[in-house]
Image (tube, coloured by chain):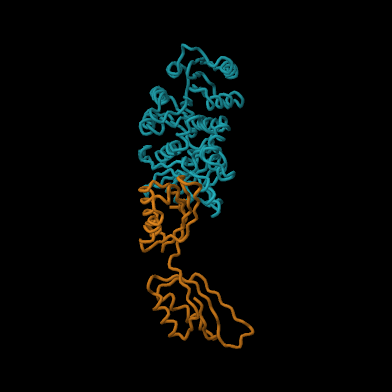
């Protein structure tokens, strides 16, 4: 199977390294970062390109752009792993539209285009007989989409609840364990590389809300938008709140929940018993799916990380190979 | 409630029947015979829930059966939830906040733990509310949500049991 890889940040590098190391039958014919690109229809030597990127900061020829790679390379699936822009979805949205128009399958970790334009993109993919897969957008390595479409096929999903932001979960875990203030825990999260310089997106609940929107649209196809989510972050929590929770054998977690039957779409810090299955530690993610037949299913795993996210992406690519084999 | 009755066949059943007759629900029955007791009576403790206003009827029915009621302990509100409130709780009139719940008639604040780290800093409190049932609790939390919004308090609700 031939693939074009757009984006060589942490996730892109994880995907490229995994393909080079494990040789899962995926040939990279096009590659682009934000400044350059390269095309080789016989297959790019990934190890060499990654070494070049490490030394020079660019992966290929500065006259070749991501758009050129999408237009001109010979590939079956576009792996789109550029950074998320939650407001416009660009440039990823344009890349995905262009590849879908060329009847190429899409595998992405990019939350922007899926949260903003799921309806349009999935319709376009369906019309062109190709797959649009985005397992890596929610819950990192946790196979949520695979569980929903395969394992829970035939179930009606009644509600979803979960911890979808590892940064917040790390901060809350540290505040509870060490009695740190929010500011101290945030500083520590930054030092550990778990939080961005501008943490707004994570700590205000926006990132969790975007993932909730993606899940809601996938499960119920209800056209939910970010503005429909009632959002409260963790940035105003006091150490006393965690201490008082602890006294009642409880703790606090940032929970994203969607219950269409009760018109609930909410991200908010919640008081929970410490032995609740969604009370996970550190940067872990967890999600409970409540269904009519299986009842509650809770999945727990790593919500971020280079190789962890690559796990979700490789899984999607191989799914396409196995289900669209005739054309790919 | 704690009951005393004759220790003869059929007495316990006779004492339990009126409970279901008035729409009550038995949660537990504890019954023990004291071997050294010379009385030919039996002491039984029954834990039950009753619809509002049915207690007098139950007491009358039990008396008719010749059952002596030793003690009745009442707890009106059985449904409990704990929340955390963060903000300027005193400056925004904590007693008014509590009163908004208490004045509903179906729910009340039964416990508050509070921490005030410094003057002019936000304080944090853990508030336990009791209500008659789940529906009333949901209404009480809706009241608290509205009050918290008005007073710019951060309300941390428990994660409800599954839908």
Residue A176 picture quarter: top right
Residue A116 picture quarter: top left
Which chain is the one coloured cyan? A
Residue at the location (49% across, 19% down)?
A: A32
**Residue B90 seen in this snapshot:** yes
Seen in the image, is B51 located left or right of residue A29?
Answer: left
Which chain is the one coloured orange? B
Residue B7 at what x, y percent from top left? 55, 85
Q: How many marks?
A: 0
Seen in the image, is A185 located left or right of residue B137?
Answer: right
Residue at the right extreme, as displayed:
B36
Seen in the image, is A213 located left or right of residue A32?
Answer: left
Residue B107 at what x, y percent from top left? 40, 61
Residue A206 at what x, y percent from top left? 43, 37
**Residue A328 seen in this snapshot:** no
Q: Nearer the viewer, residue B117 or B113?
A: B117
Residue A97 vs A265, above or below: the answer is: above
Q: Nearer the viewer, residue A303 or A79?
A: A303
Q: Nearer the viewer, residue B114 or B138?
A: B114
Residue at the front extreme, as displayed:
B119
Residue at the location (59% across, 45% down)?
A: A177
């Amino acid at each position: 199977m031939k693939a074009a890889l757009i984006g060589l940040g942490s996730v892109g590098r994880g995907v490229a390294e995994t393909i080079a190391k494990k040789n899962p039958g995926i040939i990279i014919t096009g590659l682009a970062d934000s400044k350059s690109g390269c095309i080789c229809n016989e297959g790019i030597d990934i190890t060499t390109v990654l070494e070049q990127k490490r030394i020079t900061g660019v992966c290929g020829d500065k006259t070749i752009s991501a758009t050129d790679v999408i237009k001109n390379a010979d590939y079956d699936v576009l792996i789109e792993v550029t950074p998320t822009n939650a407001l416009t979805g660009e440039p990823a949205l344009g890349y995905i539209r262009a590849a879908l128009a060329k009847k190429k399958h899409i595998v992405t970790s990019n939350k922007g285009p899926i949260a903003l334009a799921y309806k349009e993109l999935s319709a376009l993919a369906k019309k062109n007989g190709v797959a649009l897969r985005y397992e890596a957008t929610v819950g990192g390595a946790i196979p949520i989409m695979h569980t929903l479409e395969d394992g829970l096929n035939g179930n009606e999903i009644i509600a979803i609840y979960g911890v979808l932001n590892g940064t917040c979960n790390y901060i809350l875990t540290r505040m509870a364990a060490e009695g740190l203030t929010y500011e101290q825990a945030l500083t520590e999260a930054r030092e550990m590389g778990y939080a961005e310089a501008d943490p707004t997106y994570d700590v205000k609940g926006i990132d969790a809300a975007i993932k909730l929107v993606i899940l809601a649209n996938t499960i119920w196809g209800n056209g939910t938008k970010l503005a429909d989510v009632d959002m409260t972050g963790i940035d105003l929590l006091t150490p006393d709140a965690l201490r008082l929770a602890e006294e009642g054998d409880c703790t606090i977690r940032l929970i994203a929940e969607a219950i269409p039957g009760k018109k609930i779409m909410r991200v908010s810090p919640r008081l929970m018993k410490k032995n609740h299955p969604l009370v996970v530690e550190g940067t872990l993610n967890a999600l409970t799916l409540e269904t009519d037949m299986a009842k509650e299913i809770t999945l727990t795993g790593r919500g971020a990380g280079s190789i962890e996210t690559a796990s979700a992406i490789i899984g999607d690519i191989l799914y396409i190979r196995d289900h669209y084999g005739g054309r790919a | 409630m704690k009951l005393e009755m004759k220790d003869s066949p059929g007495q316990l059943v006779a004492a339990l029947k009126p409970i279901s007759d008035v729409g009550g629900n038995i949660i537990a029955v504890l019954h023990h015979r004291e071997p050294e007791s010379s009385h030919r009576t039996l002491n039984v403790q029954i834990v039950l829930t009753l619809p509002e206003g049915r207690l007098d009827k139950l007491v009358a029915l039990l008396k008719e059966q010749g059952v002596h009621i030793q003690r009745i302990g009442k707890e009106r509100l059985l449904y409990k939830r704990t929340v955390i409130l963060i903000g300027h709780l005193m400056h925004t009139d904590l007693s008014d906040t509590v009163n908004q719940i208490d004045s509903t008639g179906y729910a009340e604040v039964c416990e508050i733990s509070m921490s005030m780290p410094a003057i002019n800093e936000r304080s944090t409190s853990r508030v336990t509310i009791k209500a008659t049932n789940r529906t009333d609790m949901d209404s009480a939390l809706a009241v608290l949500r509205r009050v918290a919004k008005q007073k710019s308090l951060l309300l941390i609700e428990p994660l409800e049991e599954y839908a």
